[in-house]
Amino acid sequence: MSRAIVPGPTYAEMRNPMLLPAAFRQRVIAARADETNPLNLFNINWKNTGEEVEKIVLPKELTGVQANIVVLSGRNFPSGSMKVGPAYATLAEHEALEGLRPGDRIVIGPSTGNFGIGTAYVSMLKGYKAIVVMPDNMSKERYERIRKYKGELDLTPGTESDVILTLERTHSEYVSKPDKYVTLAQFELLPNYRFHRHVTGKAALDAVKGIGNGRIAAFASAPGSAGTLAAGDAIKAVYPEAKIVALEPRECSTLYNGGQGQHRIEGIGDKMVTLIHNVFNTDLLMLIHDEDTVRGMEVIQSGTHVLVDRLGVPSDVACQLYGKFGPSCICNIIGAIKTAKYLGLGPEDNVVTIATDSYDRYPSVSEALYERNGGKPTDDQLEMWAKSVFLGATLGEIIDLNTGGHHERLQQMKLDLWTKFGYSPDFIQRMADQEFWDAEYEKIKEIDPLIAEARGSLP
Ligand SMILES: Cc1ncc(COP(=O)(O)O)c(C=O)c1O
């Protein structure tokens, strides 16, 4: 039986939570103490408890580049990762535009983890049953969180590189039965694009205020669904000269050269051009070695003293980094360093990147590293890793997508994949034009009043 909507924010309120009445926002912030409190839906924003975007400016002793590398920190979103944002936006659009109500249908979240965690979490708060479709070989912390948020699991074989199997299962088992299931299809539905262009894009623009020249020279992000990359479209709307940089695991270099291998960077490198990836607006593509991301994570996690004593990172700054990054965050950081080197950026320039989640879901990845390494790394090893992973990031394996027909090649890959899932060639062709993306983005103006109307007055 249908029940009333559990209220949540509009896109505008996620972009700027200060739009919420002050007394209500105080209640919302207090609700953080109990993550099962549905008021936490209003904590889906980059600003945590204040007005400032949560960010970390990396020390130059670690990056080795003059440019400022600014990392937006997604770990303070409810459920511990900013992927809860697109999950919420997609469900909220279903409620506002299609009349979905709690109890009507089961919510499906195809994912490799964080989107699934976000789906389970949002569904729990909003009163829906959720099933997360994901590979069976991801970090165990992910499954624990999904179960904690009362999500069920429908596991497909493999790892991050086998997401295509989850996509196939999602379509055959769930999308095909729309009367029973509502699928938050992150790889293909545009709320994911809208959330990141509107909310993450603005956070990136705000985060660099007062740093360097206050502008953004480049935005680097490793696509899973490629939702986060949409923040680049917001950045380019303000700074048209900015570069959008996509990063891929070297071991699964699908966009780079059709590579299809297994890799260790959970959350990214999903062996496909996703439908919502605005490929014609992506400027550079870089490969990152997966083991470097795990080693880099370990340096931050076990090597605070090494960073201080051997690299000269100020100790308060080194301590601030502790606990903040998982492998995909380190991938983004390495990509940002490569970007700064490749573009020859100086001390006034800013490169923005993203920490989608944090270390809390990767202790098991550290354990696996210790096994491969024959034990915990020594200080000498940690120093060597820090110097090779971060300071030693090289300029190899970079493609300028604006040349050589690469955009067209990626568009063709998109066409080949997504027509198999029922999208028309004509629809996909329209995605080659920026107008398509701008029109999708502009829909927020119509959607927001509908979200506000459907939720009624604030609780
Ligand atoms: C840990 C992690 N990093 C990066 C990403 C990639 O973000 P996006 O799907 O927005 O491209 C994801 C996506 O799930 C993720 O879980």
Image: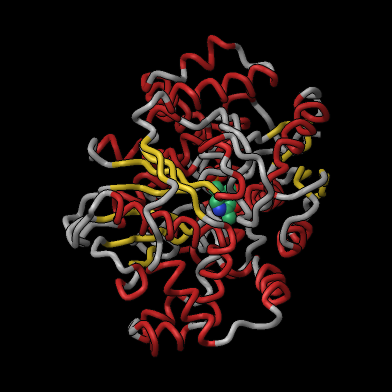
Image quadrant in which you'd find residue 376: bottom right
Observer-nearest of 313 and 126: 313
At horizontal 26% and vertical 49% (from top left) the residue drawn is 343
- The correct choice, above or below, for 137 with respect to 88 in the image is below
- The correct choice, above or below, for 391 with respect to 439 in the image is below
Image quadrant in which you'd find residue 214: bottom left
Left or right: residue 288 compared with residue 34: left
Q: Position of residue 393 (x, y in %)?
A: 40, 61
Left or right: residue 206 compared with residue 83: left
Question: Is residue 28 visible from the viewing direction of this image?
Answer: no
Observer-nearest of 241 and 398: 398
Q: How is the image coloured?
A: secondary structure
Q: Position of residue 278 (x, y in %)?
A: 45, 30
In the rendered image, the quadrant that contains the N terminus is top right
Left or right: residue 44 compared with residue 156: left
At horizontal 65% and vertical 67% (from top left) the residue drawn is 362
Q: Position of residue 171 (x, y in %)?
A: 76, 27
At horizontal 58% and vertical 66% (from top left) the residue drawn is 294
Question: Is residue 177 visible from the viewing direction of this image?
Answer: yes
Q: Position of residue 284 (x, y in %)?
A: 38, 40
